[in-house]
């Protein structure tokens, strides 16, 4: 689990990413910040390692490590679009659950 955010830092990141979410995946602190309500009370969903849920507003998001390149993939980040075939988010390297890119 990442270090808990302090409120000031959380506020800064919330403002930065709320309107423009590009780069959320590469910011480790964003694992513990809800982009809907700004809460830092994020918990992993029981039984689903890659889904995180905001305890405040109930918003859930996908965040996982890419098995191919080790970078973080975050469902809130437009740089990690949804794959139409497997339904998972695509890493910046092109990997999703369909396997490595051609
Ligand atoms: Zn929330
Ligand atoms: Zn990758
Ligand atoms: Zn896919």
Image (cartoon, rainbow, N blue to C red):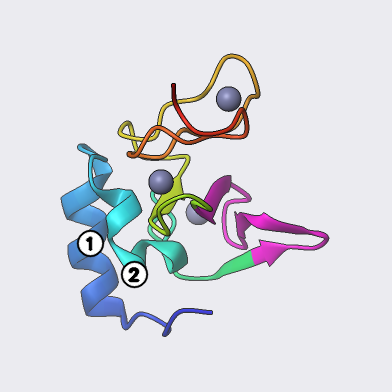
Q: Indicate left or right for 18 with 87 as reference.
A: left
- Answer with the quarter of the image where residue 70 lies: bottom left
| Residue 86 vertical position relative to residue 64 in the rendered view, above or below | above
Secondary structure predominantly adopted by residues drawn in magenta: strand
The quarter of the rendered structure image containing the N terminus is bottom right
| Residue 75 vertical position relative to residue 65 in the rendered view, above or below | above
Between disc 1 and disc 2, whose residue precedes? 1
Distance, label 1 to label 2, CA atoms, is 8 Å
Q: Residue at x 30, y 34 (%)?
A: 79
User: Residue 46: in sight, yes or no?
Assistant: yes
Q: Which structural element holds mark 2?
A: helix
Q: Residues within 10 Å of mark 2 (few under 14, many from 20)?
A: some
Q: Residues within 10 Å of mark 1 (few under 14, many from 20)?
A: some
Q: Indicate left or right for 38 with 99 as reference.
A: left
In front of the other: 52 or 90: 90
- Answer with the quarter of the image where residue 39 lies: bottom left
- Residue 7 location in percent, x, y? 30, 78
Q: Residue at x 63, y 50 (%)?
A: 58
| Residue 28 vertical position relative to residue 97 in the rendered view, above or below | below
Return the residue at label 1: 13
The quarter of the rendered structure image containing the C terminus is top left
* Extent of the magenta region: 44-65
Q: Which mark is residue 29?
A: 2
The mark total stands at 2
């Amino acid at each position: 689990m990442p270090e808990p955010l302090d409120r000031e830092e959380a506020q800064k990141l919330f403002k930065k990413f709320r309107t423009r979410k590009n780069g959320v995946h590469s910011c480790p602190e964003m694992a513990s910040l809800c982009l809907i309500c700004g809460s830092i009370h994020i918990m992993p969903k029981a039984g689903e390692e890659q889904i995180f849920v905001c305890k405040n507003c109930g918003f859930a998001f996908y965040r996982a490590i890419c098995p191919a390149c080790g970078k973080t993939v975050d469902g809130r980040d437009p740089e990690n679009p949804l794959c139409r075939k497997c339904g998972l988010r695509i890493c910046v390297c092109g990997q999703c659950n369909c396997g490595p890119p051609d």
